[in-house]
Image: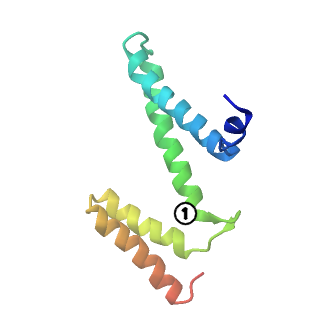
């Protein structure tokens, strides 16, 4: 093999290499779950805590997204829109109705001058 063949190879950009490594790691972690589930069982209390922690993490993410933007308070329009959508979701309204009500409430409040 000549030196020109090696030098003509297209180098893998570092960002792409990092993305591929993260994708492979994510795939292997997701594959490990079902594979290890049969071999290792968690105590019932630990399983309950994992379920609760997932809900709490999702709630914290939703709260942070609803209340802040660029590390500052968003104003009352967005949280009130989220509240309207949350009430409809709690009342088991269709998903489309929940999203439209939340977006519509926020848009109308902002149209009325509420920040």
Q: Is residue 10 above or below residue 74?
A: above
- Given residues 41 and 79, the one toward you in this image is 41
Please tell me how many numbered marks the rendered image carries. Answer: 1
Image quarter of residue 2: top right
Residue 67 on image: x %, y %: 59, 64
* Furthest residue in direction front, as rendered: 2
Quadrant in the picture for the C terminus: bottom right
Q: Which residue occupies 51% across, 42% down?
A: 56
Q: How is the image coloured?
A: rainbow
Q: Which residue is mark 1?
A: 66
Residue 91 x %, y %: 29, 60
Q: Quadrant of residue 48?
A: top left
Question: Where is residue 5 drawn, in percent x and y?
Answer: 67, 37
Left or right: where 79 falls relative to 84: right
Q: Is residue 41 above or below residue 17?
A: above
Which quadrant holds residue 70?
bottom right
Quadrant assignment for the N terminus:
top right
Residue lying at 55% horizontally and 56% vertically, measured from the top left:
63
Percent across and percent down for residue 109 are 49, 83
Q: Nearer the viewer, residue 74 or 3?
A: 3
Name the residue at 55% across, 63% down: 66
Looking at the image, residue 65 sits to the left or right of residue 49; the answer is right
Q: As drawn, which residue projects farthest toward the top?
A: 39
Q: Nearer the viewer, residue 4 or 84?
A: 4
- For residue 76, side relative to residue 4 (left or right): left
What is the secondary structure assignment of the residue under circle 1? helix
Q: Quick check: 106 above or below 59?
A: below
From what the image shows, is residue 27 above or below residue 46? below
Determine crowd level at label 1: few under 14, some 14-19, many 20+ residues with C-alpha closer than 10 A: many
């Amino acid at each position: 093999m000549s030196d020109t063949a090696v030098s003509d190879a297209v180098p893998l950009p570092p960002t792409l290499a990092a993305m591929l490594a993260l994708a492979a790691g994510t795939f292997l972690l997701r594959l490990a779950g079902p594979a290890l589930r049969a071999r290792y069982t968690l105590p019932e209390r630990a399983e309950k805590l994992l379920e609760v922690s997932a809900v709490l993490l999702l709630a914290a993410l939703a709260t942070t997204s609803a209340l802040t933007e660029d590390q500052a308070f968003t104003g009352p329009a967005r949280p009130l829109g989220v509240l309207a959508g949350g009430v409809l979701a709690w009342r088991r309204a269709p998903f489309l109705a929940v999203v439209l009500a939340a977006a519509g409430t926020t848009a109308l409040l902002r149209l009325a001058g509420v920040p």
